[in-house]
Image (cartoon, helix red, strand yellow):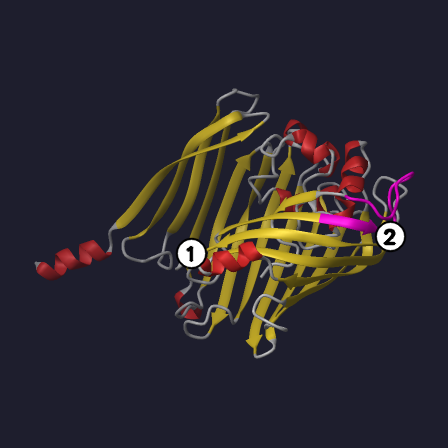
């Protein structure tokens, strides 16, 4: 009888609910519930995991109800401690964006060292944006359904010289009743050990990519910001108004992603997008460099017990450069080769999860005081400002 009770407890399924609220200019306050489901005591690594949410826009727009559901099931034959293989289903409709598909994930990690890993993810399905009212720049999404297959491989290693990360992503698919497209991106990130002291550090990122003609506008490689499809993964950027729309239109905020991330050209690209122009790179290669230097606030943070291990205010000099040939989507005259340099601050609070994935935020303020190709009637040397929730070189 006791063993039966123990078996029943082990098989119990626990569901946790939490209230959730957000804001954008179309839904107003979007209120709802987040739900997490898993087998009791499995700690996010057991069978039948569920992550879901249901929301109602309190301004009652045309489509007031939105949802997100992701179901994950481990594959025992290819899973080990911190090296899970799994498949799952994901479906969502929020801020006017449909995305539905199947996922496969596999991670390889030795023991408890989550800083050294390889992982593979495959996601295939369909997506479509059906309400441009949500978009800060409506040109970012074309109106048709897209069938897609996205494959990503990541590898990270740590040595006496620093941390090296390699990421490769392949996007393929087709716009319904239109052409097939293919896009490849890769990036290598390096973060050195201390150079002169613990607070003097070199960070570098080299990225490159290529794509076929006929790329959907949501996959466009833009010099200063993430591809529009990546905006749909961020609560801050997927709908206008969460960050005030005038700030976005003025290029005061930059959303970084897998592309070149030239922080000095956010204003130029925002102006182009606002006026109905968009471009992409048929081929590109880019470099981002940062040199950290100490500042008194960061040194004070490091002296705080426990919190000092997670809280930082980085100060750095930066240089970004991009070379490539344009895949002109809207026949817009844009300079393909660009560079910029400046200085910046990044406030970081990060408490990693059990796999080392970041949980927290990066609030960044950059001053790109030199541009190789400024706007018309603008000097190359000028005080400029750009903010972001997210790092250019993520470590």
- Residue 371 falls inside the magenta stretch: yes
Quadrant location of residue 354?
bottom left
Residue 239 drawn above or below residue 223: above
Classify 10 Å Cα crowding around label 2: few (below 14), some (14-19), many (20 and above): some
Indicate left or right for 200 with 37 as reference.
Answer: right
**Residue at 76% in and 49% down:** 368
Residue 226 visible within the image: no
Q: CA distance from mark 1 to mark 2?
A: 40 Å
Residue interval drawn in magenta:
367-383
Which one is nearer the viewer's eye here, 119 or 394? 394
Q: Which residue is mark 2?
A: 372
State whether the magenta stretch is mostly helix, strand or loop: loop
Q: Which residue is mark 1?
A: 307
Q: Secondary structure at mark 2?
A: loop
Classify 10 Å Cα crowding around label 1: few (below 14), some (14-19), many (20 and above): some
**Residue at 69% in and 51% down:** 173
| Residue 301: image location, x then y, percent | 49, 56
In which quadrant of the rendered image does the C terminus lie?
Answer: bottom right
| Residue 54: image location, x then y, percent | 44, 34
Front: mark 1 or 2: 1
């Amino acid at each position: 009888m006791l063993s039966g009770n123990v078996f029943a407890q082990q098989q119990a399924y626990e569901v946790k609910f939490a209230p959730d609220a957000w804001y954008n200019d179309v839904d107003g306050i979007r209120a709802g519930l987040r739900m997490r489901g898993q087998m009791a005591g499995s700690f996010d690594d057991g069978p039948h995991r569920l992550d879901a949410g249901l929301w109602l826009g309190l301004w009652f727009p045309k489509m007031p109800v939105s949802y997100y559901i992701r179901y994950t099931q481990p594959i025992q034959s290819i899973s080990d401690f911190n090296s899970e293989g799994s498949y799952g289903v994901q479906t969502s409709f929020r801020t006017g964006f449909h995305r539905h598909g199947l996922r496969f994930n596999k991670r390889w990690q030795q023991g408890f060292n989550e800083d050294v890993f390889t992982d593979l993810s495959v996601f295939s399905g369909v997506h479509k944006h059906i309400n441009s009212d949500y978009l800060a720049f409506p040109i970012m999404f074309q109106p048709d359904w897209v069938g897609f297959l996205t494959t990503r491989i990541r590898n990270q290693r740590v040595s006496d010289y620093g941390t090296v990360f390699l990421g490769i992503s392949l996007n393929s698919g087709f716009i319904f009743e239109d052409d097939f497209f293919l896009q490849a991106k890769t990036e290598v990130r390096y973060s050195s050990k201390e150079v002169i002291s613990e607070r003097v550090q070199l960070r570098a990122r080299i990225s490159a990519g290529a794509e076929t003609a006929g790329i959907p506008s949501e996959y466009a490689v833009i010099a200063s910001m993430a591809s529009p499809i990546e905006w749909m993964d961020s609560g801050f950027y997927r709908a206008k108004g969460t960050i005030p729309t005038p700030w976005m239109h003025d290029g005061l905020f930059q959303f970084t992603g897998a592309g070149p991330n030239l922080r000095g050209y956010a204003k130029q690209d925002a102006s182009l997008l606002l006026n109905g122009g968009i471009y992409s790179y048929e081929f590109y290669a880019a470099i981002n460099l940062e040199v950290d230097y100490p500042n008194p606030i960061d040194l004070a943070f490091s002296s705080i017990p426990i919190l000092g291990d997670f809280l930082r205010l980085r100060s750095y000099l930066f240089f970004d450069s991009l070379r490539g040939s344009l895949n002109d989507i809207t026949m817009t005259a844009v300079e393909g080769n660009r560079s910029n340099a400046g200085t910046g601050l990044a406030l970081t609070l990060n408490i990693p999860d059990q796999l080392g994935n970041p949980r927290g935020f990066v609030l960044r303020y950059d001053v790109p005081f030199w541009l190789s190709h400024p706007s018309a009637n603008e000097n190359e040397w000028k005080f400029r400002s750009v903010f972001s929730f997210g790092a250019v070189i993520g470590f």
